[in-house]
Amino acid sequence: MREPILDEAAVQGGACRAERRGLCGARTCGRGPLELIALLASKGADVKAVNAEGWTPLHLAARAGKVDRAQALLQAGADVAAANKQVRRRRRERRDGSGADILRRGSADGGHADSCCRAAQGNTALHLAAINSHVPVIKLLRQHGASADAKNADGRTPADCAKEDAVRAAVLEAAL
């Protein structure tokens, strides 16, 4: 599988894969990340491309809370309904000696919803924005048609993944 040119560095700021390959000029083409996203999209970069873990640039922007980058990606045609494919599970022996799949991350409340959502396959950008409490990104995604009813592989909606009531309310609020 070919790696996308619009990678995490381009979405979150910094040198993108195109720059590292000499496909554009000086550091971020002399422009900021927003202009870089627009430039790469205008040159044919696939804003819907996925990396090895199944993440699109929109997933990365939503996870990082970069509303301006998410907006630029949506304007360039990013798929608001795309679901990732990454599973962040690992094996660890229980104290009783039996093997069990556990999740890498937990939280103070026992980590159930948070860690399950972080590890699940099938998270949309809205799931990731909700997991990370990025309300401005949530509102933007909802305005662009992101479904609050989308379920990940664990059957959880973005609202199920939210850790705070205000975030859950933003997810459930009807798109304007």
Image: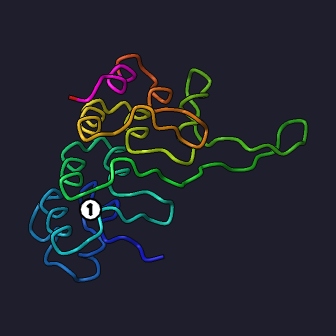
Drawn side of residue 48 relative to residue 39, left or right:
right
Q: Quadrant of residue 136?
A: top left
Amino acid type for the residue under numbered disc 1: Ala
Residue at the disc numbered 1? 10
Could you tell me which residue is drawn at 40 percent across and 22 percent down? 168
Q: Position of residue 132 (x, y in %)?
A: 40, 35
Q: Residues within 10 Å of mark 1 (few under 14, many from 20)?
A: many
- Is 158 above or below relative to 42? above
Q: Which residues are magenta?
A: 167-175
* Above or below for 143 versus 51: above
Identity of the residue drawn at 64% across and 41% down: 103
SS for dot 1: helix
| Residue located 18% across and 53% down the image | 75
Name the residue nearer the viewer: 98 or 153.
Answer: 153
Q: Quadrant of residue 24?
A: bottom left
Q: Is residue 91 left or right of residue 36?
A: right
Magenta segment, prevailing SS (helix, strand or loop): helix
Q: Nearer the viewer, residue 43 or 146?
A: 146
Quick check: 74 above or below 127?
below
Q: Nearer the viewer, residue 43 or 106?
A: 43
Q: Does the stretch in magenta take in 172?
A: yes
Q: How is the image coloured?
A: rainbow
Q: Is residue 115 left or right of residue 96?
A: left
Q: Position of residue 167 (x, y in %)?
A: 36, 23
Q: Position of residue 155 (x, y in %)?
A: 58, 35
- What x and y, as percent, mark residue 126? 38, 39
Tell me if 156 is positioned left or right of 170 in this view.
right
- Farthest residue toward the top? 165
